Image (cartoon, helix red, strand yellow):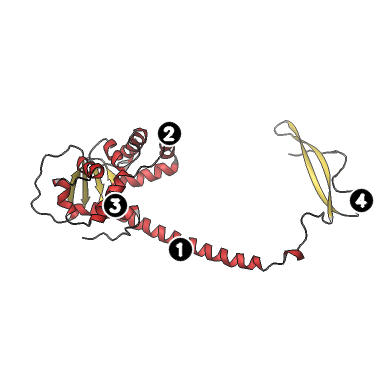
Amino acid sequence: MSFNFPARTWLGVVVSSLGLWFLPIPGIANSAIAAKKIYISYGAIERSISVNSLESYAKKGIVDDELATYAAYVSPQRLLQLQRVLLKRIDLSPVAVSQFLYTPTGTTLLKRLGEVVQTESRQSGFYALRSALILAAADPKGLTLLNILHKFPTNVRVNMGRMLQMAEALETLISQSRRAIALISENSTVAAAQVQGINFSQLPDLRSPGRFSWSKQTLKLSDRRRDRAFVADLYLPREQGQGGQGGTRDPTTEGSGD
């Protein structure tokens, strides 16, 4: 089984790293490991690893027996990428994280992530993720993927099938966005070249007065429905020579409106 996602994106690193757990590895015993585990399932296949094992590698570079079983199937470069992803810190305050997660956009994001990252009982990780993200942001260790795993209230289950679907959709969206940006940039370049050919000396000087002056009328309006009155200034353009100079003020005009 292979997971082909660009290694240059964080998404490619995470998906490819999670794919390690589905390699056919014979003779794995159910050894006593830390209670906090990550279970990664794809259809009927399920693999697991403890958060402590990931933490030991992320912080100390130690590949213990548990992780070594999977590390033998990937390149050292990919393992280093996984280490960076686990420790990558996002500098956001718990207040900012909480405020975002309670917005419509944040709620939608959590619902989608909850389909992938689930609780131990295979329920949506919506509330567990929100709690873990806020607690991790408030923790001195900061908002890192490793710290989020520690703050997750139960063992973590990752639905790999759903994750791959979302990853593919995201990669498609990113590709479409890049094409749209390239097209906009190309059109902007063409438009800029056309603007450079304009002889601005032939255009009117905006610093000079034009052939229109204006007059001002102050209207006193009454709103019968709301039983209120208010004043509005009305500026009317007029050509030079129609009497008066620009900026003159006509007598106040009484008016009413509904």
Q: Quadrant of residue 73?
A: bottom left
Q: Identify the residue position indicated by label 3 in the image.
A: 81
Q: Position of residue 129 (x, y in %)?
A: 32, 39
Q: Quadrant of the N terminus?
A: bottom left
Residue 67 lies, with reference to residue 93, above or below; the image says below
Q: Quadrant of residue 107?
A: top left
Q: Identify the residue position indicated by label 4 in the image.
A: 243
Query: Residues at badges 1 and 3 in contact (C-beta under 8 Å)?
Result: no
What's under tag 1, amino acid-wise? Arg
Cα–Cα gap, marks 3 and 4: 78 Å
Q: Identify the residue position indicated by label 1 in the image.
A: 179
Q: Residue at x 25, y 42 (%)?
A: 59
Query: Residues at badges 2 and 4 in contact (C-beta under 8 Å)?
Result: no
Left or right of residue 232, residue 64 in this image: left
Cα–Cα gap, marks 3 and 2: 29 Å
Work out whether mark 1 precedes mark 3 in sequence or the reverse, and give the earlier one.
3
Q: Identify the residue position indicated by label 2 in the image.
A: 95
Q: Residue at x 27, y 51 (%)?
A: 80
Cα–Cα gap, marks 1 and 3: 27 Å
Label 4 SS = loop
Q: Quadrant of the C terminus?
A: top right
Instruction: Tell me if mark 3 has few (under 14), some (14-19) or many (20+) residues whose alpha carbon lies within 10 angstroms of its own.
Output: some
Q: Nearer the viewer, residue 220 or 17?
A: 17
Q: Quadrant of residue 131?
A: top left
Label 2 SS = helix
Label 1 SS = helix
What's under tag 3, amino acid-wise? Gln
Instruction: Tell me if mark 4 has few (under 14), some (14-19) or many (20+) residues whose alpha carbon lies within 10 angstroms of its own.
Output: few
